[in-house]
Amino acid sequence: MATQLGFDLPARTALGRDDFMIAPSNAVAVAMIDDWRRWPAGKLALSGPTGSGKTHLAHVWAEQCGGQIVDAATLTDDNIVGFATGPVAVEDVDTIAPDMPAQTALFHLHNLLLAAGTPLLMTGTAAPTHWHMTLPDLQSRIAAAGHAALDAPDDSLLTAVIAKLFADRQLTPRPDVIPYLLPRMERSFVAAQRLVTALDAASLARKQPVTRALAATVLDKDTPNAG
């Protein structure tokens, strides 16, 4: 295998439909995204832990339906008319629970989209019943949406996610690296992102390929209690 050179290349996150790995933990959510024309009342709430693929699926959906993607915290009464011209994915809705102006803007955007028969995708970390909007009318409308959850990854999905994270960074780890990481790392997408970022930095700094020995060193620093 060719030795990797120490070039500081930017990570390129692949967000196409074919780049999303389907596993039992996300198959229902993927099916509901693909079947967006039949969402109840034209809206869906998508939940899952950080790094589980919500943004990726939002991009897949937006590409399918010609929609826009917006961060919930950026919504205002001044900009919602522009967003209401077509399908909209509003990300991180659960983060605006303390933000009444953003909640009010989302409420008005919801009503504009509903009146136009235009679909709305909303994402958050917890299930939508736990988004705790302080605007009761908004929370009731969220509760009326369909819901799809992205669950914690199994081994096959975590393997695929780590491989994709390496590919996004244009890294080719030795074949024994991912099997070595799996039983020793925290079982989360966030941990996978953190480890791959650390391995990328270590590989660049040492001008070495990503090997099991390098992975062991990075794991020891990242997860002191790893076995």
Image (cartoon, rainbow, N blue to C red):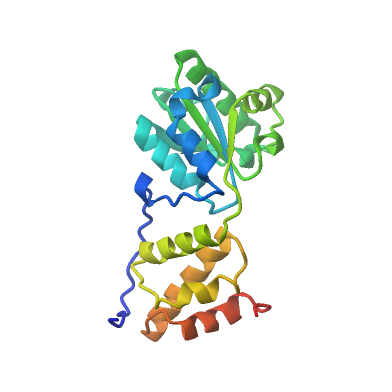
Give the left or right position of residue 9, taking residue 94 as reference: left
**Which sits in the foreground, 82 or 166?**
166
For image coordinates 66% across by 27% down, the residue present is 143
Q: Position of residue 141 (x, y in %)?
A: 63, 23
Q: Position of residue 200 (x, y in %)?
A: 42, 73
Compared with 11, 100 (above or below) is: above
Look at 47% across and 69% down and name the residue there: 197
- The residue sitting at the left extreme is 2
x and y percent of residue 158 in the render? Answer: 52, 61
Of the pair 5 and 29, the residue shown nearer to us: 29
Residue at image position (62%, 67%) is: 186
Q: For this rendering, which residue is in front, 217 or 77?
A: 217
Against 52, residue 31 (above or below) is: above
Q: Residue at x 40, y 67 (%)?
A: 166
Res. 131 in view = yes
Picture quadrant where residue 207 is located: bottom left
Quadrant location, the C terminus: bottom right
Examine the image and state in which quarter residue 226 appears. Answer: bottom right
Q: Position of residue 68 (x, y in %)?
A: 40, 34
Q: In this rendering, would 8 be left or right of 126?
A: left
Of residues 163 and 144, the one drawn nearer to the viewer in this rendering: 163
User: Would residue 16 be visible to someone looking at this image?
Assistant: no
